[in-house]
Amino acid sequence: MRIVVKVGTSTLAHATGRMNIRHVEDLIKVLSDLKNAGHEVILVSSGAIGMGVGKLNLPGKPSDMPSKQAAAAVGQGRLMHLYDNAFAERGILTAQVLLTRDDLKNRTRFLNIRNTFSELLNWGVIPVVNENDTVSVNELKFSDNDNLASLLINPVEADLFVNLTTIGGVLDANPLENPDATIMPCIEDVRALNLDTLCGGKTSVGTGGMYSKLLSAHRVAQLGVPTAILPGCEPDVIPRLFAGETIGTWVRPEQRTVSRRKYWLAYQADPQGTLYLDTGAADAVRNHGKSLLPGGITEVHGSFEAGALVRLVYDRETVGVGLSNYNAADLLRIRGLKRHEVAAILGDAHYPEVVHRDNLLLDAAL
């Protein structure tokens, strides 16, 4: 089994920002045992800033971007040194892989990443992955390693996603509003959850919160990959899960999976614009596997070029995302029109579809 294990700073570090050595050693012991049992392991690990904070004797985690990046630059080497030495004591080699969103966005680099991971795993190496915080301003400020791990599931072709967190699992209600909320042992359909209600909204939970974890679980479920959201601070939590103990929260995969190409197209970049659909177009796209035609578009928002990723919306709900064959200016001219009317405006050299069904992913987890 090929397993992606993601661990966040809150699991690895004390409240001071400095590393919790006991938690790190427990994690390395468990992952080494998984490797020795014949599993292939990819570790997605935060903690570079925390290591830098400790080495620099800072009073806490910096708040400004230059200081965060500088602390990450100091800490990343030390974090990798810690992992490399600890795994080496157990006879296991590691490899450092630092990624940016652009690495996964560029198709050639994406394929190179896939080939590199394949070779490392064939050699019996545990790749240790992190965002390249020193140069990735947008990723460091807006994204998190939950997102990175969910995107990495695709090129490494993982069978299981284990997301370690500081709480016992996914609660069935927002604990700020319902103190009696209990952990859900299994989520059958993650798409059916209202994440804003359950998690208190994306912005309030912050980077790496449960909103982000469930969004990532939704994504990988589309590839047919299950997610285990586990209390990473408890001892031997992964072996206990494998032994059949009810612990944390399982998120089941979808039965109807999407192609890896569609997954890459949908999540390789943020949508650059929004197309609003009428009732007929929404039904055709959502329920009948049709492409989106100009006549079904009521509004065009944003400024984007042909080939950009756009969001499709009906009645204030996202239907999906897809690649637009037209730029925003042309779509404003042809929205709501039939094919012969489009030809009269744009000439014969035009696409019949605005978004072809082959370049469209429904129910995207954005």
Image: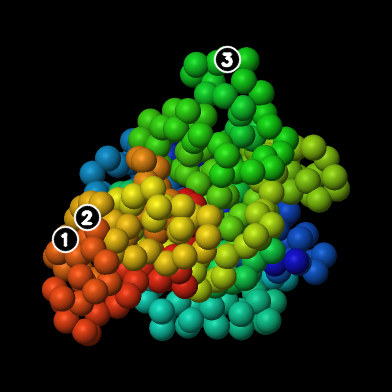
Q: Which dot marks residue 179? A: 3
Rendered image coloring scheme:
rainbow
Could you say whether the residue bearing mark 3 is in a helix, strand or loop? loop
Disc nearer the start of the sequence (3/2): 3
Name the residue type under label 2.
Val
Q: Count neighbours of disc 3 (C-alpha within 10 A) and say few if under 14, some if 14 to 19, many if 20 or more.
A: few
The residue sitting at 32% across, 75% down in the picture is 352
User: Nearest the camera: 294 or 31?
Assistant: 294
Q: Are marks 2 and 1 in contact (CB under 8 Å)?
A: yes
What's the amino acid at mark 1?
Leu
Which residue lies most toward the right here? 243
Q: Is residue 47 left or right of residue 276?
A: right
Which residue carries the number 1 mark? 332
Residue marked by disc 2 = 300
The tag earlier along the polypeptide, 1 or 3, is: 3
Relative depth, front residue between 38 and 322: 322
